[in-house]
Amino acid sequence: MAHEATIPRGAMLRTVFSKTLRDQRKALAWWAAGFAGAILLYSSFWPSVRDNAEQFNEYLRKLPDFLKNLLGQIDYTTPEGYLQSELFVFLAPTLLIVYGIGAGARAVAGEEEAGSLDLLLSVPIRRRRVLVDKFAAMLGAIFLLTTVMWISVVAFGPLFDLRVGLGGFTAMSLNTFLLGMVFGSLALAVGTATGRRSVAIGVASGLAVATFIVNTLGPSVDWLDPFRLLSPFYYYADGNPILNGLDPVHALVLAGVSVAAFVYALWAFERRELTA
Amino acid sequence: MSDAIAVEGLTKSYGSTRGVIDLTFSVGPGEVFGYLGPNGAGKTTTIRTLLDFIRPTRGTATVLGRDSRRDSVEIHRRTGYLPGEGSLYERLTGGEYLRYLAELRGGVDWRVAAGLAERLDCDLSVKIRGLSHGNRQKVALIQAFMHRPELLVLDEPTQGLDPLVQQEFHAMVEEVRREGRTVFLSSHVMPEVERLCDRIAIIREGRLVAVEEVGDLRERQVRMLEIRFAEPPRPDLFDGSPGVSDVAVNGDTIRIRVAGSIDGVVKAAARFEVVDLMSHEPSLEDIFLTYYGKEGDRGA
């Protein structure tokens, strides 16, 4: 029987980086569509929020302290305050963190559990090169989703008269990207060190929930307050970047945690005994 | 020319009983070397150490003259590997998968890959998700052979292949041998390695039991013979024949164990009317008995 002898097309199959993104292309498309759709929806609510500002502010005054902390103490009835509370308190960080943890846990642990890592590493490429590519692909995917978010707000917002200062909004977008990278890198590091995807997902998402709670309750609970400095969410939102612009030190802390986790993963991967 | 593979005092402990203990053997260039042992004996552990997926607890492995730990990238470049377990990327087609590995290897002559696919009758346009176990094994075989490596390390290569494809695989190994390249293959079935290999190492419970030329092994091989006669045979029929033991008569049938040549037995039997003669493929246990003798432990 004669078979197709031509070389299969494969521009995306040239490197571990592009192949890893290729694997995610459908998932990424759905996530991006959902993200953009949610932003369109929230933008469309803005006119009625603005027109009922009095009632909303009345409602907000009655909220418990920790919820006020959560919302960032910004006037809900300004475009920045609305965007902060609807997008940056929960939706955007959750989406990027969840996606990041998934991608990070799959990077090595996913391949190892599926049994495809042996053959991938049987080619003449250093383990650390494979990991650099996997990390870069995770970064690329999170960056892409962040960009979709940014474009959606800039494109859909004005349709409903939701206009925010680009500097602060971009700063907050960058912080969200970095937050996704922090937890994605942690998942990648744990997955690379253990070879187990469930452990990677469990540890990274557990840390995400715990540090979120610490940062949110910190201002209301005295003994917890100092520990806020250990929470990535503190560096993410403290100081209201959406109004005041980027705090470079905070952004560097987030980037530093991500890089440190990645460097640890490189170190651990070289020493790992891979499971068959 | 140095050895294709040289393993010295190689030990891999996992804390429990699994692993390998103090292995020392070498594989010459151009040799087809069989690594025979039951499942769980340590074959895969040895192979994965050669390729630096796991690291020796003690001892060293040298592959193509290079240290398995320090020079793993060069070893990988010059070696084709077929894993015993594991999977391919479900969402790629066979062709895409080969293309990916070829790209990561810095390019291969695609005609070789296509030619191998043709020989093994492997449709590369189907997603791996939709392939049977045997067809996945074909794709895995192609990736091991496609860059024409100096050394092929194949872990249970014929698992799941149907007999026709097995024959084609045997021909592929034969070609590799003719070209002076080296093959290291593991198996848990004797006839396969006996047919393909020049030399065989036998491993059991993590220890090397023997390294033998196939010819020598055959001479010492133990077979179970079952001969049915037209009339019930005398139990002392084979008393004078060399290598015979464990004689059991059951009606008109006699079962015996023969070590080495069966010539004497056949000639002794031929004095009577033989209705049927069956030779059972020696099990690994039978082969181990060759080395351990009757007192050898048959446990585990």
Image (cartoon, rainbow, N blue to C red):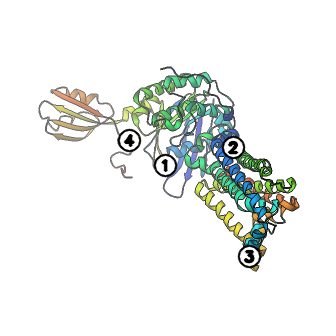
Question: What is the crowding at mark 3: few (fewer than 14 residues within 10 Å), some, or many (at least 20)?
Answer: few
Name the amino acid, label 3: Lys
Front residue of this view, candidates B222 and A255: A255
- What residue sits 25% from the left and 32% below the top? B278
Numbered disc in front, either 4 or 3: 3
Front residue of this view, candidates B218 and A141: A141
Numbered disc in front, either 4 or 2: 2
Asked if badge 1 and badge 3 are on a common chain, one would say no
Numbered disc in front, either 1 or 3: 3
Asked if badge 4 and badge 1 are on a common chain, one would say yes
What kind of element bears circle 1?
loop
Asked if badge 2 and badge 1 are on a common chain, one would say no
Mark number displayed over residue B109: none
Can you tell which quarter of the image residue A220 is in?
bottom right
Name the amino acid, label 2: Val
> Image check: B149 left or right of A253?
left
The Cα–Cα distance between marks 2 and 1, rounded to whole angstroms, is: 32 Å
Can you tell which quarter of the image residue B220 is in?
top left
Name the amino acid, label 4: Leu
Question: What is the crowding at mark 2: few (fewer than 14 residues within 10 Å), some, or many (at least 20)?
Answer: many
Q: Residue A43: tell me if it is visible.
A: yes
Q: Which residue is mark 3?
A: A62
Q: Position of residue A142 (x, y in %)?
A: 72, 49
Mark 1 chain: B
Q: Which residue is mark 4?
A: B284
Q: Residue furthest front?
A: A51
Q: Which residue is mark 1?
A: B206
Q: Position of residue B275 (x, y in %)?
A: 17, 28
Mark 4 chain: B
- What residue sits 78% from the left and 47% below the top? A155
Question: What is the crowding at mark 4: few (fewer than 14 residues within 10 Å), some, or many (at least 20)?
Answer: some
Mark number displayed over residue A130: 2
